[in-house]
Amino acid sequence: MSRTIPARRGRPSAALSPQRKISVSLRLKRIFRAWQLYVLLAPSLIYIAVFKYWPMYGVQIAFKNYSPAAGFTDSPWVGLTHFVRFVNSYQFGQVLGNTLWIAVLGLLVAFPIPIILALLVNQLQSERFKKFTQTVLYSPAFISTVVVVGIMFVVLSPRSGLLNNAIQLAGGEPIFFMGSAEWFRPIYVISDVWQNAGFSMIVYLAALAAIDPALHDAAKVDGASKLQRVRHIDLPGIMPVVTILFILAIGNLLNVGFEKALLMQTPLNLSSSEIIQTYVYHAGLQQAQFSYSAAIGLFNSILNLALLLFFNTVARRANQATLW
Amino acid sequence: MSLTTNPRTTGSPARAVIQHRPRQTLRDKYGDRVFNVTATAVLLLSILAVVYPLYFIVIASVSDPNAIYEGKVWLFPSGVTLEGYQRIFADSRIWNGLGNTLIYTVLGTVISVTTILCGAYALSRKDMPGRKILMLLFVITMFFDGGLITKYLVVRDLGMLNTVWAVVLPGAVGVWNLIIARSFFEHTIPNELREAAQMDGATDFKFFFKMVLPLSKPLIMLMVMVHVVAQWNSFFDALIFLNDDSKYPLQLVLRNILIQSDVSSTGTTGGDIQSYAAAQRIAELTKYAMIVVSSLPLMIALPFMQKHFTKGAMIGAVK
């Protein structure tokens, strides 16, 4: 503004400072005028301050020897001791391996299935069958994790379970599914698909609904088959949503399913069911090794964040939709 | 995008208008038919895979436990008995847990929904100074958090251990829900409406409570349902923050009985092996009945809730 008035060019600071003052007071006035909005926001802000940022501040105990009397700030500093201890502990390889196994298996199997289901449901002719399929497939999402794991225990029970009855009927030997380490991962992933695929499908169905029907009509006129239309119209059409959900899934890769893993744990399957977060729970809350387990939790968070950043960058390089 | 339109469902009659199908050869029609049959078959199998285990649980819950042991229960209940249900309803832990769950669900839902609606509305206002930085503060917590241990220590330092607050507060505001609510407000409350209201002298409070909330019924329904379902089904916060049995919510009681195989309630008479085995079988029967009873309320409400959840998924997808 001041540039248009040549006379003032000699003393820019003097010319600008009253303006800046005005803008500061104007800003204050604007802030003051919006006070009611800040009051509305206050409960949420207090919430994240107390239950998100205070624990984040407390993460420093991962580098300290936490004592309840000294609190987060005054506990004595020990550097990377806890991390070194975790990396050198005999469980490290196993726990990390189990965590990655479940995460990757879950991503490879459980991520694509809802997409396939949505593409199929979307092509159904009958609206009523479409609705029915949707409702049935997503109903397990409303069953609690506790009950889903409870169902596993009764249905897979070696003495009276449905599956073992079927196996015995077919002449096989009953299998103690919940008590064997090698069955933990398949059961974990299959039950995940069983419970959540239908619910995840809905987001893709919403994205498919947003595709312009004219594209399908044009393709039909050109003689494209259904399969071709699914591949060349539907799939590219939902790709941005797929990418975003994929990145979000990566961002939660090492966090999801912790509760289920904990519930599915039995002393007999620990060698494949002990993941980083259940280990944190056992070491931290059951054995009260607060600093040590906070360090492991931090290790998990950082690993997770690194994965997220990595895949977001990959998506950007590939010119796909990204989170930011 | 407006919430109430679904181009696909309204679009199909429009497609039917196009009658002429040039260049559609016999081979193409055959290919489409194969596609349709395959799709229907895959979906029918998926439906069966979802429904059969649930159906089995229901028929097993009223069957004679011995018949289940012998593998005689497949499609129909055998030797109908309601003993499992009788035992559940006689179990004070279940009733107590149910009562606690009701309290936690109502209280938790009220707190969460109120906080989220107010906060999301403020964040949806583009004229609120500092909006971007404040939003960033929320988004950061989606990607990094302090972890289980420090959360536990904070709750302990607040003196909330073993209180209702430890169950309803630590997970009260989900940032994802906040974002969904914010984008709902951004898309459904026109700026002109606010400007007109402000001309007439309405304050932000007045506008929010008298205009915005009445216009946001679908969002409020969605938020209430999301939180009712989540709170009804949650057990983990109760597990780590509560240590008094009498405060346990239903899910934690279920966990102890279903998964930790706590048979004490089912009347183990002790002594000989035969009565122990009988008690075991009754315990199994009780488990089936318990799964049914605890899941039934949400399953009954499901058809009613479906519409709202589908809409919610759409707001999320459009984000």
Image (tube, helix red, strand yellow):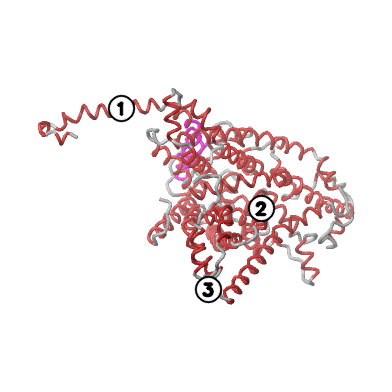
Output the chain of dot 2: A
Give the residue at x 81% y 55%: B60
Q: Dot 2: what SS? A: helix
- Is there any visible trace of residue B44 in the rendered image? yes
Circles 3, 2 touching at the beta carbon (< 8 Å): no
Q: Residues within 10 Å of mark 3 (few under 14, many from 20)?
A: few
Comparing B95 with B59, the one in front is: B59
**In the rendered structure, the residue with mark 3 lies on which chain?**
B
Question: Residue B18: percent from the left, percent from the top?
Answer: 55, 62
| Res B23 label | 3
Q: Which residue was labeled with disc 1?
A: A26
- Res A109 quadrant in image: bottom right
Q: Is residue B234 magenta?
A: no
Q: Earlier in the sequence, mark 2 or mark 1?
A: 1
Q: CA distance from mark 3 to mark 1?
A: 68 Å
Number of residues whose C-alpha sits closer than 10 Å to that of mark 2, classed few (under 14), some (14–19) or many (20 or more): some
Give the distance between the C-alpha atoms of the residues marked 3 and 2, in whole angstroms.
Answer: 37 Å
- Answer yes or no: are tags 3 and 1 on the same subunit: no
Q: Tell me the chief SS of the magenta region.
A: helix
